[in-house]
Image (cartoon, rainbow, N blue to C red):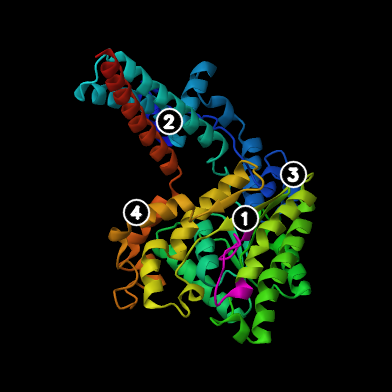
Amino acid sequence: MQRLQNRLARRCCSSAHGVQALPALPVRRAYQPASRRVCNNNTPSSACRALLGGSHQAQQQEDTAVQVVQQPEQLQSAPLLPVPVQRILTRRSVQYEEGMHKPLGLVLFGAYVLGSASSVAGVPGPVWLPTLIGAAIGGVFAAFHRYCSARVWRPPNSPLNILVTGGTKGLGKALAREFLAHNDSVIITGRSHAALAETMAALRSELQGLGHEHQPHLRGVVCDVTQPEQVAALAAQARQLLGTVDVWICNAGYSGSFKHFLEQEPGTIEAVVRTNLLGTLLCSREAARLMLGQQLGGHIFIMDGAGADGSATPQYAAYGATKASFPQLAASLRAELASTHVGVHVLSPGMMLTELLLEGATTANKQAFNILCEHPETVAAFLVPRVRSAVSCGLNGTYTRYLTPASAVYRLLTAPGRIGRFFDAAGAAVYAAEHDRILGKGAKATARRQALARARTSSLGVAYSLSLALSFVVLSLDTHASAFTGH
Protein backbone atom coordinates (compact mmCIF):
# COMPACT_ATOMS: atom_id res chain seq x y z
CA MET A 1 0.00 0.00 0.00
CA GLN A 2 2.69 2.49 1.04
CA ARG A 3 4.90 1.51 -1.89
CA LEU A 4 1.98 2.14 -4.26
CA GLN A 5 1.44 5.60 -2.82
CA ASN A 6 5.14 6.43 -3.09
CA ARG A 7 5.25 5.39 -6.75
CA LEU A 8 2.17 7.47 -7.56
CA ALA A 9 3.63 10.42 -5.70
CA ARG A 10 6.82 10.26 -7.74
CA ARG A 11 5.10 9.76 -11.10
CA CYS A 12 1.88 11.73 -10.88
CA CYS A 13 2.36 14.49 -8.36
CA SER A 14 5.63 16.10 -9.49
CA SER A 15 5.67 19.74 -10.48
CA ALA A 16 8.10 22.56 -11.04
CA HIS A 17 8.28 23.00 -7.30
CA GLY A 18 9.10 19.38 -6.56
CA VAL A 19 7.06 16.41 -5.44
CA GLN A 20 3.90 16.92 -3.45
CA ALA A 21 2.80 14.49 -0.75
CA LEU A 22 0.04 12.08 -1.67
CA PRO A 23 -2.67 11.79 0.99
CA ALA A 24 -3.17 8.47 2.69
CA LEU A 25 -5.73 6.35 0.90
CA PRO A 26 -8.54 4.77 2.90
CA VAL A 27 -8.01 1.12 3.74
CA ARG A 28 -10.74 -1.49 4.05
CA ARG A 29 -11.61 -1.82 7.71
CA ALA A 30 -11.66 -5.18 9.42
CA TYR A 31 -12.32 -6.37 12.94
CA GLN A 32 -11.07 -4.19 15.76
CA PRO A 33 -11.09 -5.40 19.35
CA ALA A 34 -13.36 -3.71 21.81
CA SER A 35 -10.62 -1.60 23.36
CA ARG A 36 -9.61 -0.26 19.94
CA ARG A 37 -13.10 0.40 18.60
CA VAL A 38 -14.51 2.10 21.70
CA CYS A 39 -11.61 4.59 21.71
CA ASN A 40 -11.36 6.54 18.48
CA ASN A 41 -10.44 10.05 17.45
CA ASN A 42 -13.94 11.25 18.38
CA THR A 43 -13.64 9.97 21.93
CA PRO A 44 -12.42 12.46 24.55
CA SER A 45 -8.93 11.74 25.78
CA SER A 46 -10.13 11.42 29.36
CA ALA A 47 -12.58 8.69 28.32
CA CYS A 48 -9.81 6.91 26.42
CA ARG A 49 -7.63 6.96 29.50
CA ALA A 50 -10.48 5.55 31.56
CA LEU A 51 -11.05 2.73 29.08
CA LEU A 52 -7.40 1.98 28.37
CA GLY A 53 -5.94 2.64 31.78
CA GLY A 54 -3.86 5.66 30.75
CA SER A 55 -2.26 3.62 27.99
CA HIS A 56 0.06 4.81 25.28
CA GLN A 57 -2.82 4.46 22.79
CA ALA A 58 -4.95 7.05 24.63
CA GLN A 59 -2.03 9.47 24.85
CA GLN A 60 -1.24 9.00 21.16
CA GLN A 61 -4.85 9.70 20.17
CA GLU A 62 -4.89 12.83 22.33
CA ASP A 63 -1.68 14.08 20.69
CA THR A 64 -3.16 13.46 17.24
CA ALA A 65 -6.37 15.33 18.09
CA VAL A 66 -4.42 18.30 19.47
CA GLN A 67 -2.22 18.45 16.38
CA VAL A 68 -5.24 18.48 14.05
CA VAL A 69 -6.95 21.24 16.05
CA GLN A 70 -3.82 23.39 16.21
CA GLN A 71 -2.75 22.90 12.59
CA PRO A 72 -5.91 22.58 10.46
CA GLU A 73 -4.12 24.07 7.45
CA GLN A 74 -2.29 20.77 6.97
CA LEU A 75 -5.58 19.07 6.12
CA GLN A 76 -6.58 21.80 3.66
CA SER A 77 -3.24 21.95 1.86
CA ALA A 78 -3.04 18.22 1.09
CA PRO A 79 -3.60 17.54 -2.63
CA LEU A 80 -6.62 15.33 -3.33
CA LEU A 81 -7.08 12.78 -6.10
CA PRO A 82 -10.47 12.44 -7.79
CA VAL A 83 -12.76 10.19 -5.79
CA PRO A 84 -13.07 7.50 -8.54
CA VAL A 85 -9.26 7.31 -8.80
CA GLN A 86 -8.95 6.98 -5.03
CA ARG A 87 -11.48 4.15 -5.00
CA ILE A 88 -9.73 2.28 -7.79
CA LEU A 89 -6.29 2.67 -6.23
CA THR A 90 -7.58 1.69 -2.81
CA ARG A 91 -9.33 -1.41 -4.15
CA ARG A 92 -6.30 -2.51 -6.16
CA SER A 93 -3.84 -1.94 -3.33
CA VAL A 94 -6.02 -3.82 -0.85
CA GLN A 95 -6.42 -6.66 -3.35
CA TYR A 96 -2.67 -6.80 -3.79
CA GLU A 97 -2.02 -6.86 -0.05
CA GLU A 98 -4.60 -9.59 0.57
CA GLY A 99 -3.52 -11.77 -2.35
CA MET A 100 -6.69 -11.06 -4.32
CA HIS A 101 -4.72 -10.62 -7.53
CA LYS A 102 -4.47 -14.41 -7.82
CA PRO A 103 -7.93 -15.28 -9.27
CA LEU A 104 -6.93 -14.33 -12.83
CA GLY A 105 -3.83 -16.49 -12.51
CA LEU A 106 -5.91 -19.45 -11.36
CA VAL A 107 -8.20 -19.10 -14.39
CA LEU A 108 -5.39 -18.72 -16.93
CA PHE A 109 -3.28 -21.47 -15.39
CA GLY A 110 -6.17 -23.93 -15.38
CA ALA A 111 -7.02 -23.15 -19.00
CA TYR A 112 -3.39 -23.45 -20.11
CA VAL A 113 -2.58 -26.66 -18.23
CA LEU A 114 -5.70 -28.60 -19.17
CA GLY A 115 -5.66 -27.39 -22.79
CA SER A 116 -1.94 -28.13 -23.23
CA ALA A 117 -2.12 -31.52 -21.52
CA SER A 118 -5.05 -32.60 -23.69
CA SER A 119 -3.27 -31.45 -26.83
CA VAL A 120 0.01 -33.19 -25.95
CA ALA A 121 -1.79 -36.39 -24.96
CA GLY A 122 -3.52 -36.47 -28.32
CA VAL A 123 -7.04 -36.15 -27.02
CA PRO A 124 -9.14 -35.65 -30.18
CA GLY A 125 -11.69 -32.92 -30.49
CA PRO A 126 -11.54 -29.15 -30.32
CA VAL A 127 -8.82 -27.81 -28.04
CA TRP A 128 -11.11 -25.09 -26.78
CA LEU A 129 -13.21 -27.60 -24.80
CA PRO A 130 -10.52 -28.64 -22.27
CA THR A 131 -9.27 -25.06 -22.22
CA LEU A 132 -12.73 -23.84 -21.29
CA ILE A 133 -13.10 -26.55 -18.65
CA GLY A 134 -9.74 -25.58 -17.14
CA ALA A 135 -10.77 -21.93 -17.06
CA ALA A 136 -14.06 -22.86 -15.38
CA ILE A 137 -12.23 -24.87 -12.71
CA GLY A 138 -9.90 -21.94 -12.14
CA GLY A 139 -12.87 -19.61 -11.83
CA VAL A 140 -14.53 -21.81 -9.22
CA PHE A 141 -11.40 -21.97 -7.10
CA ALA A 142 -10.78 -18.26 -7.60
CA ALA A 143 -14.24 -17.66 -6.12
CA PHE A 144 -13.40 -19.95 -3.19
CA HIS A 145 -10.12 -18.09 -2.70
CA ARG A 146 -11.87 -14.73 -2.69
CA TYR A 147 -14.53 -15.92 -0.27
CA CYS A 148 -11.99 -17.44 2.14
CA SER A 149 -9.78 -14.36 2.01
CA ALA A 150 -12.70 -12.11 2.90
CA ARG A 151 -14.67 -14.32 5.31
CA VAL A 152 -12.39 -17.01 6.74
CA TRP A 153 -8.70 -16.00 6.54
CA ARG A 154 -8.97 -12.29 7.28
CA PRO A 155 -6.63 -11.22 10.12
CA PRO A 156 -7.63 -8.58 12.65
CA ASN A 157 -7.01 -4.99 11.70
CA SER A 158 -5.60 -4.23 15.16
CA PRO A 159 -3.64 -6.20 17.77
CA LEU A 160 -5.64 -8.41 20.11
CA ASN A 161 -5.62 -8.85 23.88
CA ILE A 162 -4.81 -12.48 24.70
CA LEU A 163 -4.79 -14.53 27.91
CA VAL A 164 -3.12 -17.97 27.89
CA THR A 165 -3.26 -20.19 30.95
CA GLY A 166 -0.36 -22.57 31.45
CA GLY A 167 1.97 -20.36 29.43
CA THR A 168 5.34 -21.06 31.04
CA LYS A 169 6.39 -23.96 28.80
CA GLY A 170 5.40 -26.19 25.93
CA LEU A 171 2.52 -25.13 23.72
CA GLY A 172 1.42 -22.31 26.03
CA LYS A 173 4.80 -20.62 25.74
CA ALA A 174 4.86 -21.17 21.97
CA LEU A 175 1.38 -19.66 21.62
CA ALA A 176 2.47 -16.60 23.60
CA ARG A 177 5.54 -16.18 21.39
CA GLU A 178 3.46 -16.39 18.22
CA PHE A 179 0.84 -13.92 19.44
CA LEU A 180 3.57 -11.50 20.52
CA ALA A 181 5.11 -11.77 17.06
CA HIS A 182 1.80 -10.37 15.75
CA ASN A 183 2.14 -7.44 18.21
CA ASP A 184 -0.73 -8.73 20.34
CA SER A 185 -0.85 -8.01 24.08
CA VAL A 186 -0.46 -11.26 26.02
CA ILE A 187 -0.93 -12.40 29.62
CA ILE A 188 0.46 -15.81 30.55
CA THR A 189 -0.18 -17.66 33.78
CA GLY A 190 1.87 -20.09 35.83
CA ARG A 191 1.95 -21.51 39.32
CA SER A 192 5.18 -19.84 40.44
CA HIS A 193 6.81 -16.44 40.17
CA ALA A 194 10.13 -18.03 39.24
CA ALA A 195 8.72 -19.95 36.27
CA LEU A 196 6.87 -16.88 35.01
CA ALA A 197 9.92 -14.64 35.31
CA GLU A 198 12.11 -17.15 33.47
CA THR A 199 9.59 -17.62 30.65
CA MET A 200 8.95 -13.91 30.21
CA ALA A 201 12.67 -13.15 30.05
CA ALA A 202 13.16 -15.93 27.49
CA LEU A 203 10.28 -14.71 25.31
CA ARG A 204 11.54 -11.12 25.31
CA SER A 205 15.04 -12.30 24.42
CA GLU A 206 13.77 -14.54 21.63
CA LEU A 207 11.60 -11.84 20.07
CA GLN A 208 14.48 -9.39 20.18
CA GLY A 209 16.74 -11.99 18.58
CA LEU A 210 14.16 -12.57 15.84
CA GLY A 211 14.32 -8.89 14.94
CA HIS A 212 11.01 -7.62 16.28
CA GLU A 213 11.26 -3.88 16.72
CA HIS A 214 8.41 -3.37 19.17
CA GLN A 215 8.74 -4.11 22.85
CA PRO A 216 6.47 -7.12 23.52
CA HIS A 217 3.33 -6.38 25.53
CA LEU A 218 3.76 -9.36 27.85
CA ARG A 219 2.52 -9.76 31.42
CA GLY A 220 2.61 -12.70 33.81
CA VAL A 221 0.10 -13.58 36.51
CA VAL A 222 0.56 -16.30 39.12
CA CYS A 223 -2.54 -18.48 39.14
CA ASP A 224 -3.45 -22.01 40.16
CA VAL A 225 -6.41 -22.81 37.91
CA THR A 226 -7.76 -25.34 40.41
CA GLN A 227 -8.46 -22.56 42.93
CA PRO A 228 -11.69 -20.61 42.23
CA GLU A 229 -10.56 -17.47 44.06
CA GLN A 230 -7.29 -17.35 42.10
CA VAL A 231 -9.09 -17.73 38.77
CA ALA A 232 -11.50 -14.94 39.71
CA ALA A 233 -8.52 -12.77 40.67
CA LEU A 234 -6.92 -13.59 37.31
CA ALA A 235 -9.97 -12.30 35.45
CA ALA A 236 -9.92 -9.10 37.50
CA GLN A 237 -6.21 -8.57 36.82
CA ALA A 238 -6.70 -9.22 33.11
CA ARG A 239 -9.41 -6.56 33.01
CA GLN A 240 -7.11 -4.14 34.81
CA LEU A 241 -4.03 -4.86 32.68
CA LEU A 242 -5.66 -5.17 29.25
CA GLY A 243 -8.92 -3.28 29.53
CA THR A 244 -10.69 -5.98 27.52
CA VAL A 245 -9.83 -9.60 26.78
CA ASP A 246 -10.46 -10.64 23.18
CA VAL A 247 -9.20 -14.23 23.54
CA TRP A 248 -8.95 -16.50 26.59
CA ILE A 249 -7.18 -19.81 25.88
CA CYS A 250 -7.71 -22.56 28.46
CA ASN A 251 -4.38 -24.33 27.98
CA ALA A 252 -3.25 -25.29 31.49
CA GLY A 253 -3.12 -29.05 31.92
CA TYR A 254 -1.48 -31.93 33.76
CA SER A 255 -0.86 -35.44 32.45
CA GLY A 256 0.06 -37.35 35.59
CA SER A 257 2.54 -40.22 35.47
CA PHE A 258 2.96 -42.89 32.80
CA LYS A 259 1.36 -45.86 34.56
CA HIS A 260 -1.48 -48.32 34.22
CA PHE A 261 -4.64 -46.88 35.68
CA LEU A 262 -4.78 -49.61 38.36
CA GLU A 263 -1.35 -48.53 39.58
CA GLN A 264 -1.98 -44.79 39.69
CA GLU A 265 -1.88 -43.05 43.04
CA PRO A 266 -5.19 -41.46 44.12
CA GLY A 267 -3.43 -38.13 44.57
CA THR A 268 -2.18 -38.20 40.98
CA ILE A 269 -5.64 -38.99 39.61
CA GLU A 270 -7.12 -36.15 41.64
CA ALA A 271 -4.44 -33.72 40.43
CA VAL A 272 -5.11 -34.62 36.79
CA VAL A 273 -8.87 -34.22 37.14
CA ARG A 274 -8.62 -30.99 39.12
CA THR A 275 -6.14 -29.34 36.75
CA ASN A 276 -7.63 -30.44 33.45
CA LEU A 277 -11.36 -30.62 34.11
CA LEU A 278 -11.99 -28.39 37.13
CA GLY A 279 -9.40 -25.86 35.95
CA THR A 280 -10.96 -25.61 32.50
CA LEU A 281 -14.45 -25.31 34.00
CA LEU A 282 -13.39 -22.50 36.32
CA CYS A 283 -11.45 -20.65 33.63
CA SER A 284 -14.28 -20.96 31.10
CA ARG A 285 -16.78 -19.65 33.64
CA GLU A 286 -14.67 -16.63 34.60
CA ALA A 287 -13.83 -15.92 30.96
CA ALA A 288 -17.52 -15.96 30.03
CA ARG A 289 -18.40 -13.69 32.94
CA LEU A 290 -15.65 -11.27 31.96
CA MET A 291 -16.62 -11.19 28.29
CA LEU A 292 -20.34 -10.80 28.98
CA GLY A 293 -19.44 -7.51 30.63
CA GLN A 294 -17.59 -6.31 27.53
CA GLN A 295 -19.43 -4.41 24.84
CA LEU A 296 -18.22 -6.69 22.04
CA GLY A 297 -17.90 -9.93 24.00
CA GLY A 298 -14.91 -12.16 23.29
CA HIS A 299 -13.79 -15.67 22.42
CA ILE A 300 -12.98 -18.66 24.64
CA PHE A 301 -10.71 -21.39 23.25
CA ILE A 302 -10.51 -24.77 24.98
CA MET A 303 -7.45 -26.93 24.29
CA ASP A 304 -8.23 -30.60 23.74
CA GLY A 305 -5.70 -33.45 23.72
CA ALA A 306 -5.27 -37.18 23.44
CA GLY A 307 -8.59 -38.91 24.06
CA ALA A 308 -10.76 -35.96 23.06
CA ASP A 309 -12.26 -38.06 20.26
CA GLY A 310 -13.03 -40.93 22.62
CA SER A 311 -10.03 -43.03 21.62
CA ALA A 312 -8.03 -45.01 24.18
CA THR A 313 -5.11 -43.42 26.05
CA PRO A 314 -3.28 -46.33 27.74
CA GLN A 315 -1.18 -45.35 30.76
CA TYR A 316 -2.93 -41.96 30.68
CA ALA A 317 -6.52 -43.03 31.35
CA ALA A 318 -7.34 -40.13 33.67
CA TYR A 319 -5.84 -37.58 31.30
CA GLY A 320 -7.77 -38.97 28.31
CA ALA A 321 -11.00 -39.05 30.30
CA THR A 322 -10.71 -35.35 31.15
CA LYS A 323 -9.91 -34.37 27.57
CA ALA A 324 -12.87 -36.39 26.25
CA SER A 325 -15.17 -34.04 28.14
CA PHE A 326 -13.95 -30.88 26.40
CA PRO A 327 -15.96 -31.10 23.15
CA GLN A 328 -19.10 -31.63 25.22
CA LEU A 329 -18.21 -28.72 27.49
CA ALA A 330 -17.66 -26.44 24.50
CA ALA A 331 -21.01 -27.45 23.00
CA SER A 332 -22.82 -26.81 26.29
CA LEU A 333 -21.22 -23.38 26.70
CA ARG A 334 -22.13 -22.44 23.12
CA ALA A 335 -25.74 -23.39 23.77
CA GLU A 336 -25.89 -21.32 26.96
CA LEU A 337 -24.14 -18.32 25.36
CA ALA A 338 -25.91 -18.53 22.01
CA SER A 339 -27.68 -15.18 22.40
CA THR A 340 -24.51 -13.33 23.43
CA HIS A 341 -21.36 -12.07 21.73
CA VAL A 342 -19.18 -14.70 23.41
CA GLY A 343 -17.80 -17.40 21.11
CA VAL A 344 -16.62 -20.80 22.30
CA HIS A 345 -14.10 -22.80 20.26
CA VAL A 346 -11.88 -25.88 20.55
CA LEU A 347 -8.22 -26.17 19.54
CA SER A 348 -6.60 -29.53 18.80
CA PRO A 349 -2.78 -29.40 18.72
CA GLY A 350 -2.22 -33.00 17.65
CA MET A 351 0.97 -34.80 18.68
CA MET A 352 3.77 -32.58 19.99
CA LEU A 353 7.21 -33.38 21.36
CA THR A 354 6.49 -32.53 24.98
CA GLU A 355 7.20 -34.15 28.33
CA LEU A 356 3.74 -35.72 28.27
CA LEU A 357 4.37 -37.52 25.01
CA LEU A 358 7.93 -38.64 25.70
CA GLU A 359 7.41 -40.04 29.19
CA GLY A 360 7.53 -43.83 28.95
CA ALA A 361 7.83 -43.83 25.14
CA THR A 362 9.50 -46.89 23.61
CA THR A 363 11.88 -46.93 20.65
CA ALA A 364 9.03 -48.01 18.38
CA ASN A 365 6.90 -45.13 19.67
CA LYS A 366 9.68 -42.68 18.89
CA GLN A 367 9.92 -43.90 15.30
CA ALA A 368 6.22 -43.13 14.94
CA PHE A 369 6.84 -39.72 16.49
CA ASN A 370 9.23 -38.97 13.61
CA ILE A 371 6.24 -39.22 11.28
CA LEU A 372 3.35 -37.71 13.22
CA CYS A 373 4.87 -35.26 15.70
CA GLU A 374 5.91 -31.61 15.55
CA HIS A 375 7.51 -29.13 17.91
CA PRO A 376 5.19 -26.78 19.86
CA GLU A 377 6.38 -23.72 17.94
CA THR A 378 5.27 -25.28 14.64
CA VAL A 379 1.83 -26.14 16.03
CA ALA A 380 1.52 -22.62 17.46
CA ALA A 381 2.33 -21.14 14.05
CA PHE A 382 -0.62 -23.12 12.68
CA LEU A 383 -3.10 -22.33 15.45
CA VAL A 384 -2.49 -18.63 16.10
CA PRO A 385 -3.41 -17.25 12.64
CA ARG A 386 -6.60 -19.30 12.72
CA VAL A 387 -7.47 -18.06 16.20
CA ARG A 388 -6.93 -14.47 15.08
CA SER A 389 -9.05 -15.00 11.95
CA ALA A 390 -11.86 -16.54 13.99
CA VAL A 391 -11.92 -13.40 16.13
CA SER A 392 -11.65 -11.07 13.14
CA CYS A 393 -14.50 -12.77 11.25
CA GLY A 394 -16.71 -13.13 14.33
CA LEU A 395 -16.90 -16.91 14.03
CA ASN A 396 -18.27 -19.21 16.71
CA GLY A 397 -17.91 -22.92 17.36
CA THR A 398 -14.76 -23.53 15.33
CA TYR A 399 -12.79 -26.73 15.93
CA THR A 400 -9.25 -26.12 14.70
CA ARG A 401 -7.24 -29.34 14.29
CA TYR A 402 -3.56 -29.40 13.47
CA LEU A 403 -3.37 -33.15 12.83
CA THR A 404 -6.41 -34.14 10.77
CA PRO A 405 -7.03 -37.64 9.36
CA ALA A 406 -6.07 -36.36 5.89
CA SER A 407 -2.81 -34.84 7.11
CA ALA A 408 -2.03 -38.02 9.06
CA VAL A 409 -2.49 -40.10 5.90
CA TYR A 410 -0.23 -37.70 3.99
CA ARG A 411 2.44 -38.02 6.67
CA LEU A 412 2.25 -41.81 6.50
CA LEU A 413 2.56 -41.73 2.70
CA THR A 414 5.65 -39.52 3.00
CA ALA A 415 7.08 -41.45 5.95
CA PRO A 416 10.41 -42.39 4.23
CA GLY A 417 11.33 -38.72 4.08
CA ARG A 418 10.56 -38.24 7.78
CA ILE A 419 12.74 -41.03 9.18
CA GLY A 420 15.22 -39.75 11.75
CA ARG A 421 13.69 -36.27 12.05
CA PHE A 422 13.60 -36.30 15.85
CA PHE A 423 14.97 -39.70 16.93
CA ASP A 424 17.56 -42.05 15.46
CA ALA A 425 17.14 -45.80 15.03
CA ALA A 426 18.13 -46.40 18.65
CA GLY A 427 15.56 -43.92 19.93
CA ALA A 428 18.05 -41.22 20.92
CA ALA A 429 16.88 -37.64 20.45
CA VAL A 430 18.60 -35.80 17.58
CA TYR A 431 16.61 -32.55 17.65
CA ALA A 432 17.93 -29.28 19.06
CA ALA A 433 16.85 -27.64 22.28
CA GLU A 434 14.13 -25.01 22.15
CA HIS A 435 16.48 -22.01 22.30
CA ASP A 436 18.62 -23.38 19.46
CA ARG A 437 15.52 -24.07 17.36
CA ILE A 438 14.33 -20.49 17.79
CA LEU A 439 17.60 -18.52 17.62
CA GLY A 440 20.42 -20.98 17.01
CA LYS A 441 21.47 -23.27 14.18
CA GLY A 442 17.97 -24.65 13.71
CA ALA A 443 16.32 -21.24 13.39
CA LYS A 444 16.08 -21.30 9.58
CA ALA A 445 14.55 -24.77 9.53
CA THR A 446 12.08 -23.72 12.22
CA ALA A 447 11.15 -20.61 10.23
CA ARG A 448 10.46 -22.74 7.13
CA ARG A 449 8.25 -25.15 9.05
CA GLN A 450 6.37 -22.29 10.66
CA ALA A 451 5.82 -20.60 7.30
CA LEU A 452 4.30 -23.80 5.93
CA ALA A 453 2.13 -24.16 9.03
CA ARG A 454 0.84 -20.59 8.72
CA ALA A 455 -0.11 -21.02 5.05
CA ARG A 456 -3.87 -21.00 4.51
CA THR A 457 -4.11 -21.98 0.84
CA SER A 458 -2.42 -25.40 0.88
CA SER A 459 -5.67 -27.40 1.06
CA LEU A 460 -7.25 -25.24 -1.62
CA GLY A 461 -4.19 -25.70 -3.83
CA VAL A 462 -4.28 -29.48 -3.46
CA ALA A 463 -7.98 -29.56 -4.33
CA TYR A 464 -7.35 -27.29 -7.34
CA SER A 465 -4.56 -29.53 -8.66
CA LEU A 466 -6.58 -32.70 -8.12
CA SER A 467 -9.56 -31.17 -9.92
CA LEU A 468 -7.44 -30.40 -12.98
CA ALA A 469 -5.94 -33.90 -12.95
CA LEU A 470 -9.35 -35.54 -12.55
CA SER A 471 -10.78 -33.46 -15.38
CA PHE A 472 -7.96 -34.57 -17.66
CA VAL A 473 -8.57 -38.23 -16.76
CA VAL A 474 -12.31 -37.88 -17.41
CA LEU A 475 -11.70 -36.21 -20.78
CA SER A 476 -9.26 -38.93 -21.80
CA LEU A 477 -11.55 -41.76 -20.73
CA ASP A 478 -14.54 -40.17 -22.42
CA THR A 479 -12.58 -39.76 -25.65
CA HIS A 480 -11.38 -43.36 -25.63
CA ALA A 481 -14.87 -44.63 -24.81
CA SER A 482 -16.34 -42.64 -27.69
CA ALA A 483 -13.68 -43.93 -30.07
CA PHE A 484 -14.28 -47.52 -28.96
CA THR A 485 -18.07 -47.17 -29.36
CA GLY A 486 -17.69 -45.60 -32.77
CA HIS A 487 -15.33 -48.36 -33.86
What numbered label is drawn on residue 126? none
In this view, the mark in front (3 or 2): 2
Residue at 44% x, 69% y is 353
- CA gap, disc 3 and disc 1: 39 Å
The span shown in magenta is 302-319
Residue type (three-letter) at the residue carrying disc 1: Val
Residue at 64% x, 78% y is 191
Secondary element type, mark 1: strand
- CA gap, disc 3 and disc 2: 31 Å
What residue did someone put label 1 on? 346
In this view, the mark in front (2 or 1): 1
Q: Are marks 3 and 2 in contact (CB under 8 Å)?
A: no
If you read the primary sequence from the N terminus, does the residue marked by circle 3 or circle 1 appear first?
A: 3
**Counting other residues with Cα less than 10 Å from the Cα at mark 1, is it few (<14), some (14-19), or many (20 or more)?**
many
What residue did someone put label 4 on? 413
What residue did someone put label 3 on? 44
In this view, the mark in front (3 or 1): 1
Residue type (three-letter) at the residue carrying disc 4: Leu
- Residue 267 figure quarter: bottom right
Out of 185 and 303, give the one closest to the viewer.
303
What residue did someone put label 2 on? 5
**Counting other residues with Cα less than 10 Å from the Cα at mark 2, is it few (<14), some (14-19), or many (20 or more)?**
some
